[in-house]
Amino acid sequence: MTQGTIAENNTYTGLIVRSESVYTSDYSGTFNYYIADTAQAGWNNIICSVDETGSVSDQLAAAAASDTTGLDSDYFKNLKSNVSQFTQSYDSLSFYHVYDFKENVSSQVMESVNMSALSDLTASGATASDTFHISYAQTPGLIAYYTDGYENITTDNFTADDIQPLDYKKTTIKNNSTIAAGDPIYKQITSENWNIILPVQKATYDRLTDSNVIEIKFKKDNTSCWVNYELKAQGNDYYVILSLHNNMVRFAGDRFTDVELLLTERSGLKIPNSYITEKAFYTVPKEYFTRGGDSNSLGLYVRDSKTNAVNFVATAIFQESKRIIILTKKKLLPAVSFKSRIPTILLRCRRSPHFRVYTMSTKGYAVFKQIDILYQNEEYTIVKAGTDFGISIYDHIALEGDAVSEDDLIN
């Protein structure tokens, strides 16, 4: 018997669901956008434009490339600050963040340049055309330039087929220079309330039934937080649905994300599962116990059902509370009665429900001890140490609990 822990892998790939709406174009033409991807748009902010003839878009491109359209000093100051922060937090083990940073900077530059050029052209009257169409934000929210077909999935209608990250595909909109009527031009995320649906094993599902709050870690950036959750079962599939109410902007471009459930580490006495068996016991009220025999041991006066003789029998205590649970012994058969310290009271011996136990040897013979299971996987069990009448570190154990009977001699 040794002290130990069981390492758990509680990282799962979850499906992100949120409130999002896809907007399509009523026109065909050249496409330009004026808000960066996953940036916040206020009500009636300009998001994008479609130019049926392409003439205004050509002027926008020319104005953006000219020396007269520039970025102000505040923009460059903010850009320098962002670069400095990224440099300080850079981790070579997460190099993919470099591409995310590059994409964000490019989007911000394009947004500022296009908006500056549009303002200049609008002031000159160049955008006053029936073939140049501007789209405005109808509600506040995050703007995203991609679609994936998951926009209408909710925590109520998802299926196991929806949570297949290896099959996931998304269509990027902002890379399109031209748009056809009916094509998506952007989507908007309108709420900071969102969910992550994690498919989990039944053991994890069962372990979480007694609470509704858990600490999680996002593997994307190793940030952690506490969230509420609910459990949902669909046939033989089990899910933990996390509820979040902020930080949507960090995941607006993601549909799947890896989440670690920070469950309490289970530490205690580590035993192989083969050492564990089940055994029935007898329960007897405390008032029936007394001390007697040559060793002044705790035990019972037992009346033999055949001879009617009453003898003192020392007992091994299994568990003690308001009742004392004792191990089944050949001397204590269901037909016998226990005699209390009040001579007129007899109690018929009854079997209790089965308890999970572990077999150990002491002084050369086998005894059973109840175990308090903290955690169990397919091979090992972590049990609580220091329990009354329980097991202790360095106890000698029987390798196959089912193959041993009480009082068997063990070499």
Image (tube, rainbow, N blue to C red):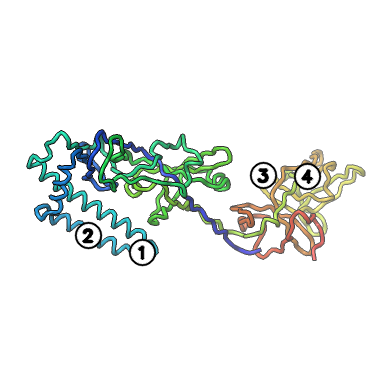
Q: Quadrant of residue 269 in the image?
A: bottom right
Q: Earlier in the sequence, mark 4 or mark 3?
A: 3
Q: Are marks 1 and 2 in contact (CB under 8 Å)?
A: no
> Label 3, on which residue?
322
Please state, as top left, top right, bottom left or bottom right, where the C terminus lies in the image: bottom right
Residue position for label 4: 341
Which callout, 4 or 2, points at the residue further toward the start of the chain? 2
**Mark 1 vs 4, N-terminal side:** 1
> Residue 148's x, y, as percent?
38, 42
Cα distance, mark 3 to mark 1?
58 Å
SS assignment at label 1: loop
Please name the residue shown 14% across and 44% down the image: 118
Residue that label 2 marks: 81
Callout in the foreground (3, 1):
1
Q: Nearer the viewer, residue 96 or 371?
A: 96
Per the model, the C-alpha gap separating discs 4 and 3 is 17 Å
Q: How far apart are the two marked residues, 1 and 2, measured between alpha carbons?
A: 18 Å
Rate crowding at label 1 as few (under 14), some (14 to 19) or many (20 or more) other CA atoms within 10 Å. few
Compare residues 276 and 14 and report the one nearer the observer: 14
| Circle 3 Cα neighbour tier, 10 Å, few/some/many (<14 / 14–19 / ≥20) | few
**For the residues marked 1 and 4, what is the alpha-carbon distance in whole angstroms?**
74 Å
Residue type (three-letter) at the residue carrying disc 2: Ser
Extreme residue toward the front, this view = 53
What is the C-alpha distance between the residues marked 2 and 3?
A: 67 Å
How many numbered marks does the figure carry? 4
Helix, strand or loop at disc 3?
Answer: loop
Residue at position x 61%, y 58% in the image:
385
Residue contact between numbered discs 4 and 3, judged by CB atoms under 8 Å: no
- N-terminal of the two: label 3 or label 1? 1
**Residue found at x 24% / y 35%:** 27
2 or 3: tag closer to the N-terminus: 2
Which residue has dot 1 on it? Answer: 91
